[in-house]
Image (cartoon, rainbow, N blue to C red):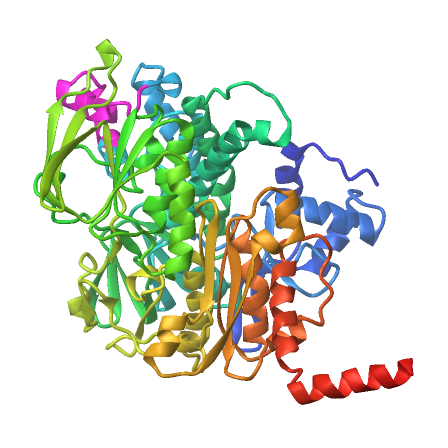
Amino acid sequence: MDAKIDPKLYGDIAEGMRKTIEVKDRKYHLQTYSKCFLGTDAIKYLMKEGFAETVEDAEMLGEALVKAGEIRHVCGEHMLKNKALFYRFKQDSPFHGAKSPRGAKSAPQTWTTVFQGLGRDWGHHTGHQPSIVSSLSEGDVNPAVQEQLKKLLKLEVSPLDKYNTELLENVHPLEWVDPEPQGKYNLVVIGAGAAGLVTSAGAAGVGAKVALIESDLLGGDCLNVGCVPSKALLKSAKIAHQIKKAKDYGIMVGEAKVDFTKIMERLRRLRAGIAHHDSAERFASLGVDVYLGHGKFISKNQVEVNGKTLTFHRAVIATGGSPNIPDIPGLRNVPLYTNLQVFNLTKLPKVIGVIGTGPIGCELAQAFARFGAEVHMFLRGTSILRKEEEEAREVVMEAMVDDGIVFHKNIKYHLVEKVEDADEKKDKPFPSIRIDISQEGKKKSVVVNAIIVAAGRKPNVTGADLEKAGVKYDPKKGVLISETLQTSNPNVFAVGDCAHKYQFTHMADFMARMVIRNSLFFGSGKVSSLLVPWATYTDPEVAHVGEYDHDLKSRNVDFDTYTRYFKDVDRAIVDSDTRGYVKILTMKGKDKILGATIVGSNAGSMISEITLAMQSNVGLGKIAAVIHPYPTAAEAIRQCGDAYNRTRLSMGVKKTLRNLLAFRRS
């Protein structure tokens, strides 16, 4: 059979099937599935009507019908099979939310049609921040789209090109129709960042009735203003740096020209290409009831969203975190960029001031410096990445100085003030902002065109009326949870950045996996049992897992240290990439790994080998017995294992071996 059928015929085939085969409520174990049919009946129909000659051909056509969205397995686990499995036609499937109501004759209004309604070429705007705000204030926008534009302002997505419209269509459709709550939910999840998405998809996958609530962008920080766009930016910065250094490798390419507009366009294109994984439609297709609105608790077992009341057996708070703005005089009165706005840039500021010296601040500072901006970092102390060990900080700081970044150490802020406005007509897209500081008692000022604030994050805990649910929280620490992720309300749990000090996407992911077991079943997983590695993606990268030496010293734990510097590793030498090291801490006199730090170009990838060893209780000595390909940077890890094994050769053993070898020569 030729399985290549015109897609527009799928609907006709499904409709004919729906009129012919038996559709009814069916029961499997304790679960009743409404309006479904058997896979065997569908296969018989397709063969009887001549759409397929064999069962195999019928199943191939059935797969096409599933992919076209015409039919679906009730749990979304199977293609159409010649088995007594339960399926539904799309008309009979429970409504979990959609871009337009069922049966709507006209297409829903989209972000694209709104932008076209502005009567401007927003997709080719080259300014650093297309000013929707000024358009609204000047009143030159079609009144019919002003409400949508106000919504867009809240979402902070800019510029309005085809890639950002694609992003918005996925993660915050303009005209989303919420489902109607039917009975009690097994689980209501507030927040659709990494933690909320994994929780809702996983819970629905095991048969739970799940509601997911999001007022902003599905995908949360990671997709929209965090991991995804930042790593796209860093890759471009690394390429620019490599071209600059090409002559050191005998390659003459001339001076690299950085097209910042194209760099940011690439970022938006890649982000939009990933967005469908986190889309509202995808999660609705997984059987999750998706509500786009602001969710608030109204009682200990109810949440309200868009005027609808959702009753739950269990709830999960996954509201994430947001940038912290430090209390610096005048800072809130000038234009500034946090991670929420910085990826909206389309022009490169000439001079940038960075407030905050943690991972986000350092990554962005180095990237913008490599693009050609003059970058100033302001330190209240003397170093960066204060959570990392001193040697790691020094290596990264040295690299950043080589990139031209100016560090102002031991400073005190006095005032931040705008001294000149931006003027697009005069080709001055950014304002001039003066930062007044004192350094070792001496006052000085630094004038910049843009300020990036990356001074830590705070949990989002004040907008969901947690008090009405009896959920205790601290504005700085977040939702207060037990080891099993339970809040002060035993039916409400919390995961991710709103509830834990480790604010990483991978941590949110594994907390979500744990909360499914603990909240819906009889799991007793403890968050303290999770071994959490992390990485900062500067160049060189810094990665860590387990404990630091200062942690062990503070607890009076005796330990041994094994260090291998990349300057002594063959692959790093031939790559001319010798900055950094591998450092592994073990229990005193034993090979049990207590912690590790890697500083180097691929540290984030390399740390997983040590994490796996720690998780599986594999000692450092056994790592030495694992053959690593030569030449690789990962050999440094094995060489630390070799160093440990050499310590097992006591003086007595060495003497015995020497005597044996001398005897054999005699």
With respect to residue 20, does 651 lie above or below? below
Q: Report which quarter residue 481 is drawn in.
A: bottom left
Q: Is residue 393 magenta?
A: no
- Pinpoint residue 206: horizontal percent, then vertical percent: 52, 68
| Main secondary structure type of the part rendered in magenta | helix
- Residue 140 covered by magenta stretch: yes
Tell me the residue at 25%/68% (across/down). 479
Residue 197 in sight: no
Q: Nearer the viewer, residue 186 or 526?
A: 526
Give the vertical position of 365 relative to 358 (above or below). above
Can see residue 24?
yes
**Which residue is drawn at the image coordinates 24% and 77% (left, top)?**
488
Q: Residue furthest top?
A: 425
Q: Quadrant of the N terminus?
A: top right
Left or right: where 128 falls relative to 620: left
Quarter of the rendering containing residue 100 = top left
Q: Is residue 643 above or below residue 599?
A: below
Closest to the observer, 31 or 501: 501
Where residue 495 appears, x then y in whole percent?
A: 35, 66
The stretch of residues the image draws in magenta is 127-149
Tell me the residue at 82%/52% (across/down).
56
Compared to residue 478, the image places residue 268 above or below, namely: above
